[in-house]
Image: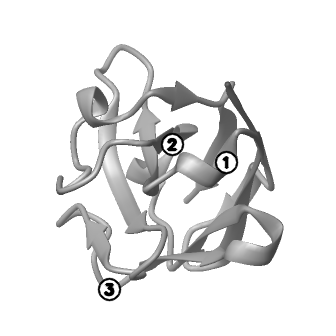
Amino acid sequence: QVQLVESGGGLVQAGGSLRLSCAASGHTFFLNAMGWFRQAPGKERVFVAAINWSAGNTYYADSVKGRFTISRDNAKNTVYLQMNSPKPEDTAVYYCAATYYSGRYYTTASDYNYWGQGTQVTVSS
C-alpha cells in the first residue's frame, strides 16, 4: 500500500503563486508516476499534471500549461505542483495520485492506483 498526504492548499490571489506538496509513504519503490487532478464543485475530477518518477517526463493539461509546474524529489518521495499566475477558474480541490502502472501518459484517473485526500485551493479575483 501507498499513502499520499497533500499539503500547501489555501487561499491565493489571482496572479499570485502557491505550491502544493504530496508526500508518499509505504511501498513507494514500485511507483512509476505521480500526478495531480482537481475537482471543482459540481464538476468531474480532471487531470492537471503528471510526472514519470524515474525519467522525469512531465505531462500537463492545456489549461495549466505554461503556468503550473510539476516536479519531484525522489529522496523525499514527494511531488510538487508549483502554481504560478493562478486564475479563479483554478479553484478546486486538488488531489494527488500515484501509480505503479508503466508505459502510460498518466492523464486519466484510471491510470492511477492510489489517491490522497485532497487539498482545497481557492483563487480570489
Name the disc covering residue 28, or none: 1
- Residue type, numbered disc 3: Gly
Mark 3 vs mark 2, CA separation in Å: 23 Å
Q: Are marks 1 and 2 in contact (CB under 8 Å)?
A: yes
Secondary element under disc 3, as helix, strand or loop, is: loop
Is 52 situated left or right of 19 in this image?
left
Precedes in sequence: disc 3 or disc 1: 1
Secondary element under disc 1, as helix, strand or loop, is: helix
Q: Are marks 3 and 1 in contact (CB under 8 Å)?
A: no
Precedes in sequence: disc 3 or disc 2: 3
Quarter placement of the N terminus: top right
Q: Is 33 or 59 nearer to us in this picture?
A: 33
Secondary element under disc 2, as helix, strand or loop, is: strand
For image coordinates 34% across by 27% down, the residue present is 45
Name the disc covering residue 104, or none: none
**Vertical relation: 10 (above or below) 64:** above
Given this view, does label 1 or label 2 mark the residue nearer the observer? 1
Q: Which residue is mark 2?
A: 98
Q: Quadrant of residue 56?
A: bottom left
Precedes in sequence: disc 1 or disc 2: 1
**How far across and how far down the image is residue 64, in percent?**
32, 68
Counting the numbered discs, the total is 3
- Residue type, numbered disc 1: Thr
Is 37 situated left or right of 58 in this image?
right
Q: Residues within 10 Å of mark 3 (few under 14, many from 20)?
A: few
Given this view, does label 3 or label 2 mark the residue nearer the observer? 2
**How far across and how far down the image is residue 71, in percent?**
56, 78
- Residue type, numbered disc 2: Ala
For image coordinates 32% across by 79% down, the residue present is 57
Name the disc covering residue 66, or none: 3
Quarter placement of the C terminus: bottom right
